[in-house]
Image (cartoon, rainbow, N blue to C red):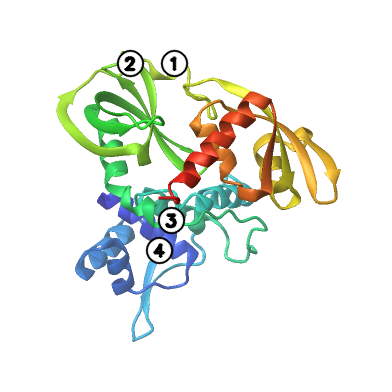
Amino acid sequence: MTKIERLISIVMMLLARETISAQELADYFQVAKRTILRDMDTLNLANIPIYAIRGSKGGFGIMPTYKFDKRLLSVTDLQNVLVALGGFQNLMLNEDIKTTLTKIRGMIPSEVTQNSVSISFHQWAGRSELASTMEMLQKAIKTHHLVQLTYIDVTGQQTTRQVEPYQLQARETRWYLEAYSLNRQAYRSFKISRITASKLLTTTFKPRDYQAQVRHQPGTFPFPSIPVRVRIDASIRDQFVERYGAKVLNVVDSNHYDAEITVPYHEFGYRYLAGFGSRLQVIAPKDFVENYKRFLKQLLSQYDK
């Protein structure tokens, strides 16, 4: 974080709270206490009315009469942005969003009640393990450096590729890298958790017109899909409504629904359906049912040895 970014963040924090001690600010920004004291002098020189309170419960504050220009966004706008960013905070693997949230909180008046909407994603342990890969990819995107990836695709095949990284995308709590593969001479989407090794190369590249390219469509697969009819327990109805919409469901009785859905005609599709356990039964088409049964028998055979 640069000095100017730290100064802006300090002002936002002071706008959000009455007083903050120099030590708390030093710990927050991971700098020396004397650096914070110099920052306060800098803010005063910039005509921002900072005051100090001595004593064990003292600290720095900002004069109540100081007004921050909020004309560009209303308080409701700021709350909506805060809800969205706050919900994705657990998905982010760097400190940038933490600074942004601090700035926005400082722009919302303290008397405004808590927003009625909250978004939350579980902070799985695996996400933190991906932090170093994400940070390296972000650096490569900003500096236009080639990246070498060792990647395992959905079929289990491992390849090593050199790519031009362009964008990190969050899709349904999963992270993907949008990049141009030099090996395939085409744009590809790489799931971050499928990257087993990555290396920032010294070679730079001239960015292509990435914005003009066709994006990867979520839910598409490199193998055929097939319409299937399944019978599901009422307890998993919500999952089908979220993924396919209520229109695919037909009531069978008070505890069951029939659903017409499309799944990959591949082991990937079998694994997806098997994940519902005994709460889902595949009814048609017959060929798919037979192949699905063989897949399940193969799974069970591992426990017969």
The amino acid pointed to by label 1 is Gln
Residue 67 visible at all: no
Residue 89 vs residue 35, the one in the foreground? 89
Residue 39 visible at all: yes
Residue 76 vs residue 190, the one in the foreground? 190
**Residue at the image position 31 percent from the left and 13 percent from the top:** 185
The amino acid pointed to by label 2 is Arg
Q: Earlier in the sequence, mark 3 or mark 4?
A: 4
| Gap between marks 4 and 1 measured at Cα | 49 Å
The amino acid pointed to by label 3 is Trp
| Gap between marks 1 and 3 measured at Cα | 32 Å
Classify mark 2: helix, strand or loop: loop
Query: Which residue matches tag 1?
Result: 213
Query: Which residue matches tag 4?
Result: 49
**Residue at the image position 62 percent from the left and 23 percent from the top:** 226
The amino acid pointed to by label 4 is Pro
**Quadrant of the image occupied by residue 27:** bottom left
Classify mark 1: helix, strand or loop: loop
| Gap between marks 1 and 2 measured at Cα | 9 Å
Query: Which residue matches tag 3?
Result: 124
Query: Which residue matches tag 2?
Result: 208
CB atoms of marks 1 and 2 within 8 Å: yes
Eye-nearest disc, 2 or 3? 3
Is 64 displayed left or right of 244 in the figure?
left
**Residue at the image position 65 percent from the left and 38 percent from the top:** 243
Looking at the picture, does residue 126 appear above or below residue 299? below
Q: Earlier in the sequence, mark 1 or mark 2?
A: 2
Binning the other alpha carbons within 10 Å of mark 1 as few (below 14), some (14 to 19) or many (20 upward) gives few
Classify mark 4: helix, strand or loop: loop
